Amino acid sequence: MSYDVRGTVADGFEGVREEFAAFVAAEAHDPGAQLAAYVGGRQVVDLWAGKDISGSSLTTHSRTVRVLGPASSGGVGNARGVARMYAAAIGTVDGRPPLLTPATVAAFAGPRTPGTDLVTGQPDHFGLGFESLTRLYPFLGTDTIGHSGATGSLGFADPGSGVAYAYTRRRFAFPSGEGASPENGRLAESVVRAARAA
């Protein structure tokens, strides 16, 4: 079964839609995925694909999940909400000043746990509450703050490019083990590339 990519992208971000459509076309099962991004506090990407998926939905965003709470995580949101939160962390959104100062973002971004992380197997993997993402995604700035999720989702804010990115999915990524699913590299890089070209 094929699934249509729905949603919008701003001028100059058509390549992001193409990357997302390529991922959806390659999926053997329902992708159940959303992708959203902001640049400079303005939403530039709002895409989704899959059964019962809309721009504001995500099947794990149900009352049952929120009441029972996942055993090893607690974040519940969709790509729109996560991208907007990261956009607000580093820049002005809807006329409101950034939630964090550049100095605070830099303090959060720096590695704080030296050595190999026992869960991810990656060296120097965590800052203060955020993952150090530049080893996995070298196109991001060293002051990027973000975190992956259990199902392969990823959200981040890259102050250098002004990009706030979020990708959510309904199914666990396979193979799993590194948090963010493999398609995040291509999707995130296409957003950052378009932002830098704009």
Image: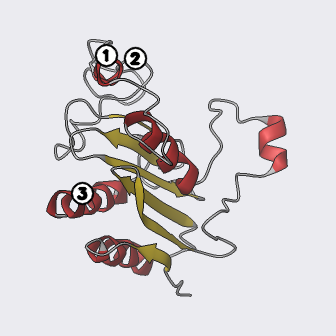
Image location of residue 3, percent across then percent down: 54, 83
Q: Is residue 175 above or below residue 69?
A: below
Q: Are marks 2 and 1 in contact (CB under 8 Å)?
A: yes
Q: Earlier in the sequence, mark 3 or mark 2?
A: 2
Q: Give SS at disc 2.
A: loop
What residue sits 29% from the left and 71% below the top?
13
Residue underneath mark 1: 107
Q: Residue type at mark 1: give it.
A: Ala
Graded by Cα atoms within 10 Å as few (under 14), some (14 to 19) or many (20 or more), the crowding at tag 1 reads some
Would you identify the image quadrant in which residue 101 lies? top left
As drawn, the label of residue 128 is 2
Q: Quadrant of the N terminus?
A: bottom right
| Amino acid carrying mark 2 in the image | Leu
- Residue 198, percent from left and from top: 19, 64
Element carrying mark 1: helix
Residue toward you, 189 or 196: 196
Q: Amino acid at mark 3?
A: Glu
Question: What residue does disc 3 label?
Answer: 189
